[in-house]
Image (spheres, rainbow, N blue to C red):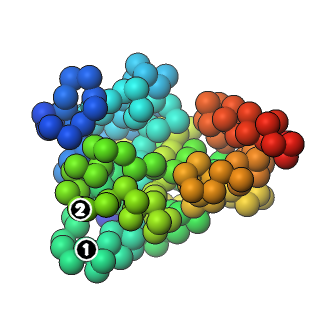
Amino acid sequence: MQLISVNLGRPVPVPYTDAPDGWTGIGKQPVAGPVKVTAPGPKGVAGSGLAGDSVGDLRHHGGDHQAVYAYAREDLDHWERELGRELPGGIFGENLTTTGIDVNGARLGERWRVGRDLVLEVASARIPCRTFAGHLDEKGWVRRFTRELRPGAYLRVVEPGEVSPGDPVEIVHRPDHEVTVAFWFRAFTTERSLLPRTLAAGDAMDPQDRAKAQAYANAYGDA
């Protein structure tokens, strides 16, 4: 299990984003590293956890609970076959392109040691947006991406450190509950009846997401 690439984005103006300033950092490019990774701060104010990485719309992206986005090379390979085009690391806007890890099967609260010092914790899944669809320029992309259940994982920074391509990734903690990245994604997109079950992830969930799940559970008597 290791990193294939570490990817950073620069601000680029585009016509397909709802970001207030009209630019996005989704088109990330691999860098040689090392890249410093720290907890960026609150959502709405702070962006990426990776030094030198840009986040365009701070209302919906970035912050402590979306500090790092990881996507598996195996899933990119799947999409290459489906779309009939080359998909280099970083093209989905991921900061870390991994290999050997079941990213979508990771459980919320699962912790990864990356390289020597960095420790990351799985926090949620990526939900596709208009900017992602415009960037990929594939017809019906949001619906298609959602249907495949290969969303990739957002992670928070538990212990800061530096990362470089080729760094090993080790799972150092795996909690005992059913809430995987793919399960969370289903609950917050197409199968809202699963929302009460995501509460098993406890404090591993973003407080805003946990509040949504709790409100649904309270409303439907499943808490």
Q: Residue 51 sits in which quadrant?
A: top left
Q: Disc 1 on helix, strand or loop?
A: helix
**Quick one: label 1, few (<14), some, or many (20+) residues within 10 Å?**
few
What is the total number of numbered labels drawn onto the structure image? 2
Q: Quadrant of the C terminus?
A: top right
Q: Position of residue 220 (x, y in %)?
A: 81, 43
Q: Position of residue 40 (x, y in %)?
A: 43, 27
| Amino acid type, residue under disc 1 in the picture | Leu
Q: Residue shown at 65%/31% (left/top)?
A: 207
Whole-angstrom CA distance, mark 1 to mark 2, is 8 Å
- Residue that label 2 marks: 138
Tags 1 and 2 touching, CB below 8 Å: yes
- Judge from the rendering whether residue 53 lies leftward or rightward of residue 171; answer left or right: left
The residue lying at 30 percent from left, 49 percent from top is: 132
Q: Earlier in the sequence, mark 1 or mark 2?
A: 1
Q: Is residue 170 visible?
A: yes
Asked if 211 appears above or below 89 in the picture, the reply is above
Q: Is residue 159 visible?
A: no
Q: Is residue 49 above or below residue 106?
A: above
Query: Can you tell which of label 1 and label 2 is closer to the viewer?
Result: 2
Under mark 2, the amino acid is: Glu
Residue 13 pos. (x, y %): 13, 34
Q: Which residue occupies the foreground of this view, 89 or 194?
A: 194
Residue at the spot of label 1: 83
**Residue under the image location 52 percent in, 39 percent down:** 156
In this picture, is 174 found above or below 162?
Answer: below
